Amino acid sequence: MAARSQRLPSLNALKVFWAAARHGSFVKAASELHVTPSAVSLQVRQLEDELGVKLFERTARGLTLTSSGQKVLPDIASAFERLQDSFAALNESTHGGSMLTVSAAPSFATKWLLPRLSRFLAENPEIEVSLRATVELADFERSEADIGIRYGRGDYPGLVTELLLREMVFPVCSPDLIADRKKQSTTEILSGSTLLHDDSTGESEALPGWKMWLLAAGIDGVDWRKGSHFDQSALAIEAAAGGLGVALAPAVLVEGDLASGRLVRLDTAELSEPFAYYLVYPADRSDREAVKAFRTWLFAELNLPLNGTVLPMRAERSNVTRGA
């Protein structure tokens, strides 16, 4: 029997293969690796030549793995994930602390998380926090984040998913806007004010906007289509605080402004959203001290039991979370 070869393929070529397999595209892999698609194609071709097998097939839908590619991918992915974990552990031991990257939607990060983050840092001075406020998908495989706070339906396959809080929406504005209109009804105030629209929810009819709120509140005669538009909830809220009009705001994002008097609530009617805020992270990160510390602090801030409400993980593997 011939001796087993100890020579391994190029680590860079394996990394390129791993990226192309995850994305199903040389173009997307090239974007991740900051190289050209032709460089990715060349690395894959050289790897195939070295191994003597074909790893990808090109189809109308893009790249698909061959049986050989499917066979080697799990071990290659596991190896790179273990390397990432090892260097993360090395960083902790070298610097005497932990680095924690938290991914959160911009409005939640700005209006809820940042005002409270100093308390977490005071309780955990050994942890350095990097906050990624983004609506983009967070890829845990690429270590873009250690833990995420996401707004959606809670459907995050392959990730530990814990319910944090559900949301209610209602109209808010600056107290100055209605200082001389206190005897007016909500309908009269809304009819004579600029409606501020949050376009970050997209086009989904499931997400409450002015049309749905006015219907639920039983208010007629207000043109829900008029007004100014903003691409983030925080911008619409700040516009309301600045006296530009009335915003339909999620309760969690305006509790601080209501308490300080920057905003006032116009009506007692509120509309429940089908979406909620969830804490998400890969199961293999749950034992990291920084992740455990952040989760414990977050649940305490929300007065939640530490066992939480954990949604069942689906069988298929996923390492992304959707933005809000």
Image (cartoon, helix red, strand yellow):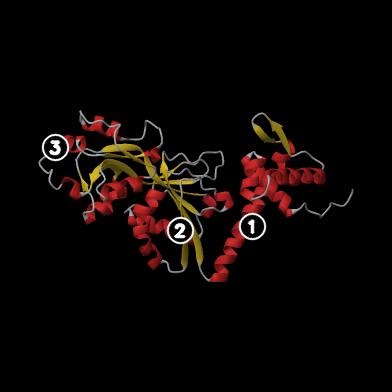
Q: Disc 2 on helix, strand or loop? A: helix
Residue at image mark 1 = 83
Q: Amino acid at mark 2?
A: Lys
Q: Amino acid at mark 3?
A: Ser
Quarter where residue 219 is shown: top left
Residue at image mark 3 = 185
Give the side of residue 145 with respect to residue 27, left or right: left
Q: CA distance from mark 3 to mark 1?
A: 62 Å
Percent x, y of residue 76: 68, 49
State whether residue 246 is above or below residue 98.
Answer: above
Give residue 292's mark.
Answer: 2
**In the rendered structure, which disc, 3 or 1, sits on the residue that comes first in sequence?**
1
Percent x, y of residue 250: 31, 44
State whether residue 52 is above or below residue 116.
Answer: above
Percent x, y of residue 223: 25, 30
Q: Disc 1 on helix, strand or loop? A: helix
Q: CA distance from mark 2 to mark 1?
A: 21 Å
Quarter where residue 24 is shown: top right
**Which quadrant is the C terminus positioned in?**
top left
Task: Tell me the crowding category of disc 3: few under 14, some 14 to 19, or many 20 or more residues within 10 angstroms, Cα based.
Answer: few
**In the rendered structure, which disc, 2 or 1, sits on the residue that comes first in sequence?**
1
Percent x, y of residue 52: 82, 42
